[in-house]
């Protein structure tokens, strides 16, 4: 990861030879002046992850960054005062041998950590944490980070408004960016609907089974975040799979290059509220795959980066896995759908995770997480909040992870990481008036409405651009497994935004990287209107069908409006 700040100036010592003589005509020997030793080289002071904001309340917010020095720094907030940073542990930020080999290998196309000496791992980092308090509700502030020996960093943040303020709120939500350095120069499969061939709209055109998207994942995700930042969101919701491998440090470094680094700084102004995905429980440099070691290391990295509200869990490793945020009239409930009942596949979203050994909470009825969600949903409804829920595993979809849970394999109609077990929560969402559920996992853009609850799969951030089912492994699409309400209201970018071509040039339609924008607006004296708009970045092509590097900012033809009566 390329450091943002530069080293401070170094003093340089010079050795001088001085000659002297008198006027008596006699000569005296040259006298060598004392040698002034040059000081030892000083390592540059860097901020490797730029300051980003977390955990906004009506009167406080956290500012976090990671750098090369343990020397405390200062955050100056305009009109408020100065706050000194607290240095916190970063033991989980470590690199395996394979990661060091990648940095110095020939396939490091994205140039991550190219400043590191040959054969070496990146330097150890120090976490700087500042809680800024004494702020006003719903107010915007400019802040500057002053780290000795480094350039100043200036950005802005906004506190949460009060619940009574009737202030309009805008946030963006996405998932499945699955960042990794390998995303540079790596494209994904880009299938098209079979509708143009006279087939079903959720079917897939066989001629597109191996077709590749016109830009690589890094380019697409950069463009997506640039568009999201232009929308000036109050906060940023990520419904899981932030990184490709939760236990791989390089993948986290790549995430921050996009979010608070050389490629983008959306997290410096918009607090991230993340949910764990299956990928945040995956991989360890010495134990690849899903196992207790991988889950533990992945969680340790997760815990290092986020400052989130407590859930008062009985196990401290359940903290930051599920939590509640109140932001003005909006309540966001985040659940951890990583693992269910290991003894029953129909109640489990990941058949490879041992919940007890990995200390991953069960989500099923009667568990600690279920009871917590029940209490928080009831309280939010009683307070008249507009309620949103996020978790990773989409419960009502048509993708590969929407097949029944089981170990028979995708070709036989079962998926070992199915989202269907999360359907158990629908009764709570209906009972407590949840406006929308935000998920991912299937890596597509999809919408259904069941009993007045909107369900979105927003897994089109920057990795896969899948369609229904999992062709060509199987042509089965689990549309028939959806409740009748979901079938009647189903919409997807795959089936309902058909591609329109002019020769070799795509002019509209198709599946592209993007995000869901959610606006909560006052309506009348008490009610709120919620407007949900899926937006995307459209890669402009030349006549030969090649991407030009330019992107249009567009929205899909599915804008959902909900009146929330209070």
Image: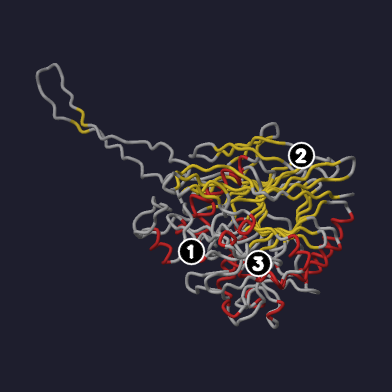
**Picture coordinates of residue 205 (x, y %)?**
53, 64
> Mark 1–mark 2 contact, CB under 8 Å?
no
Residue drawn where x is 69% and y is 68% of the image: 337
Residue 24's spot in the image, x, y percent?
12, 17
Q: On screen, 101 above or below 226?
A: below
Nearest to the observer: residue 149 or residue 360 = 360
The label number, if any, that marks residue 307 in the structure image: none
Sequence-earlier tag: 3 or 1: 1
Q: Quadrant of residue 359?
A: bottom right
Q: Is residue 456 left or right of residue 541?
A: right
Instruction: Choose the circle earlier in sequence order: 2 or 3.
Output: 2
The reply to whether discs 3 and 1 touch (Cβ–Cβ < 8 Å) is: no
Disc 1, SS: helix
Instruction: In the rendered view, tell whether residue 371 sits above or below residue 347.
Output: above
Q: What residue occupies the far top of the structure in this picture?
A: 23
Q: Circle 1 is placed at which residue position?
A: 207
| Residues at marks 1 and 2, CA–CA distance in whole angstroms | 52 Å
Q: Secondary structure at mark 2?
A: loop
CA–CA distance between discs 2 and 3? 40 Å
The chosen color scheme is: secondary structure
Single out the mark in the foreground, 1 or 2.
1
Of the two numbered discs 2 and 3 in the rendering, the one whose residue sits closer to the viewer: 3
Q: Which mark is residue 138?
A: 2
Which residue has dot 3 on it?
Answer: 398
Q: CA distance from mark 3 to mark 1?
A: 21 Å
Is residue 299 at all visible to an observer of this figure?
no
Q: Position of residue 418 (x, y in %)?
A: 65, 72
């Amino acid at each position: 990861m390329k450091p943002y700040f530069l080293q401070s100036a170094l003093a340089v010592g010079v050795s001088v030879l001085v000659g002297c003589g008198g006027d008596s005509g006699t000569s005296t020997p040259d006298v060598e002046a004392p040698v002034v030793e040059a000081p030892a080289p000083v390592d540059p002071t860097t901020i490797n992850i730029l300051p980003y904001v977390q955990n906004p309340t009506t009167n406080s917010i956290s500012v976090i960054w990671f750098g090369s020095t343990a020397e405390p720094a200062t955050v100056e907030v305009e009109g408020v005062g100065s706050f000194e940073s607290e240095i916190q542990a970063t033991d989980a930020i470590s690199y395996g041998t394979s990661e060091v080999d990648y940095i110095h290998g020939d396939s490091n196309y994205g140039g991550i950590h190219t400043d590191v000496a040959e054969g070496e791992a990146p330097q150890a980092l120090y976490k700087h944490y500042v809680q800024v308090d004494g702020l006003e509700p719903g107010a915007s502030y400019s802040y500057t980070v002053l780290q000795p020996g480094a350039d100043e960093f200036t950005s802005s943040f906004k506190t949460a408004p009060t619940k009574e303020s009737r202030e309009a709120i805008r946030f963006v939500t996405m998932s499945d960016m699955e960042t990794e350095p390998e995303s540079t120069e790596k494209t994904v499969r880009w299938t098209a609907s079979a509708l143009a061939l006279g087939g079903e709209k959720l079917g897939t055109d066989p001629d597109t089974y191996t077709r590749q998207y016109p830009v690589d994942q890094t380019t697409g995700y950069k463009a997506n975040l640039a568009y999201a930042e232009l929308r000036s969101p109050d906060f940023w919701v990520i419904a899981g799979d932030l990184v490709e491998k939760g236990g791989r440090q390089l993948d986290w470094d790549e995430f921050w290059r996009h979010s608070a680094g050389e490629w983008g700084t959306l997290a410096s102004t918009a607090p991230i509220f993340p949910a764990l995905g299956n990928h945040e429980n995956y991989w360890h440099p010495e134990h690849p795959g899903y196992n207790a070691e991988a889950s533990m290391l992945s969680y340790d990295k997760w815990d290092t980066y986020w400052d989130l509200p407590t859930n008062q869990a009985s196990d401290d490793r359940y903290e930051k896995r599920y939590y509640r945020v109140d932001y003005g009239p909006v309540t966001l409930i985040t659940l951890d759908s990583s693992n269910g009942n290991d003894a029953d596949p129909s109640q489990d979203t990941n058949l490879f995770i041992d919940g007890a050994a990995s200390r991953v909470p069960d989500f099923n009825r009667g568990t600690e997480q279920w009871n917590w969600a029940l209490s928080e949903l009831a309280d939010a409804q009683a307070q008249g909040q507009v309620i949103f829920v996020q978790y990773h595993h989409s419960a009502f979809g048509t993708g590969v992870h929407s097949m029944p849970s089981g170990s028979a394999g995708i070709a036989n109609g079962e998926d070992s990481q199915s989202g269907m077990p999360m359907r158990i929560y629908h009764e709570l969402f209906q009972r407590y008036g949840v406006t929308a559920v935000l998920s991912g996992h299937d890596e597509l853009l999809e919408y259904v409405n069941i009993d007045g609850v909107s369900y979105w799969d927003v897994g089109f951030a920057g990795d896969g651009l899948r369609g229904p089912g999992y062709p060509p492994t199987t042509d089965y699409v689990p549309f028939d497994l959806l409740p009748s309400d979901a079938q009647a209201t189903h919409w997807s970018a795959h089936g309902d935004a058909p591609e329109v071509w002019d020769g070799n040039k795509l002019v509209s339609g198709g599946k592209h990287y993007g995000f869901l924008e959610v606006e909560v607006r006052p309506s009348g004296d008490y009610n709120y209107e919620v407007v949900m708009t899926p937006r995307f970045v459209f890669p402009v092509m030349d006549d030969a069908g090649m991407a030009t590097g330019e992107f249009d900012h567009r929205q899909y033809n599915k804008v959902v409006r909900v009146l929330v009566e209070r």
